[in-house]
Amino acid sequence: MNHSLLNSSVVAFQRLRQSHIDEPEWTHRMHLLSAWGMLAEHSLSRTGSSKSTQDFERLFEMFSDLIRKLNLRNGIPNNLERGYHYTITRYWLLRLYALFPDHQAFAAFLNRPEQSGAEAISVHYSQALIYSSKARGEWVDPDRNSLGDFEGIQVE
């Protein structure tokens, strides 16, 4: 287990929660790290509970709210052209939630750009669809390949 990676994730989440990440630092990797840190801090799996759609939805709303606040702090509007992106945020959080709490799997995931790189979403979505206003504002199903099962968590 890479404690340094876990610590980096927790610190990234704390910085997101405090809106202390400048726009140039708010990279795809920082999104992934802060999401993992949030899962580590707030997942009910720590109390022995299993994953559930309700837990995922709570975490998704928390993460989404924090991203919107950070964007506003950085002067980035959250609209259908820029800022928060519903489908992309949900897609990546689903991917991470499926891995959690396996920190080794997360470390391996991060080291495989074909899985964790920002472009990896193109396996499921065409650029035209994922960058559409509709996908930015609400969940859209993939137009290339199915997402499959995310441990029973509904993708919509």
Image (cartoon, rainbow, N blue to C red):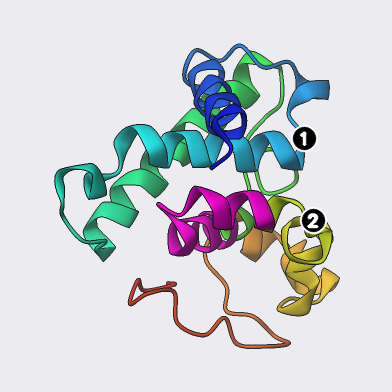
Instruction: Report if residue 86 is visible in the image.
Output: no
| Numbered disc total | 2
| Residue 79: quarter of image | top right
Q: Earlier in the sequence, mark 1 or mark 2?
A: 1
- Whether residue 35 is visible to the viewer of this picture, yes or no, is yes
Q: Position of residue 122 (x, y in %)?
A: 80, 72
Q: Is residue 17 magenta?
A: no
Q: Quick one: 136 or 122, which is closer to the camera?
A: 122
Decide whether the magenta segment is chiefly helix, strand or loop: helix
Which part of the image, by quadrant, shows the C terminus? Answer: bottom left
Point out which mark residue 27 bears.
1
The residue that appears at 63% across and 57% down in the rendered structure is: 88
Say what secondary structure mark 2 lies in. loop
Name the residue located 55 percent from the left edge and 16 percent from the top edge: 15
Q: Residue at x 24, y 63 (%)?
A: 52
Q: Which mark is residue 117?
A: 2
- Compared to 148, does 69 lie above or below? above
Q: Residues within 10 Å of mark 2 (few under 14, many from 20)?
A: some
- The type of residue carrying mark 1 is Thr
Q: Which residues are magenta?
A: 90-108
Position of 35 with respect to 54 (left or right) is right
| Viewer-proximal residue among 156 and 49 | 49
Residue 46 falls in which quadrant of the image? top left
| Kind of residue at disc 2 | Gly
> Of helix, strand and loop, which one carries label 1?
loop
Whether 92 is among the magenta residues is yes
Q: Where residue 55 sits in the image (x, y, percent)?
A: 26, 53
Q: Position of residue 37 (x, y in %)?
A: 48, 34
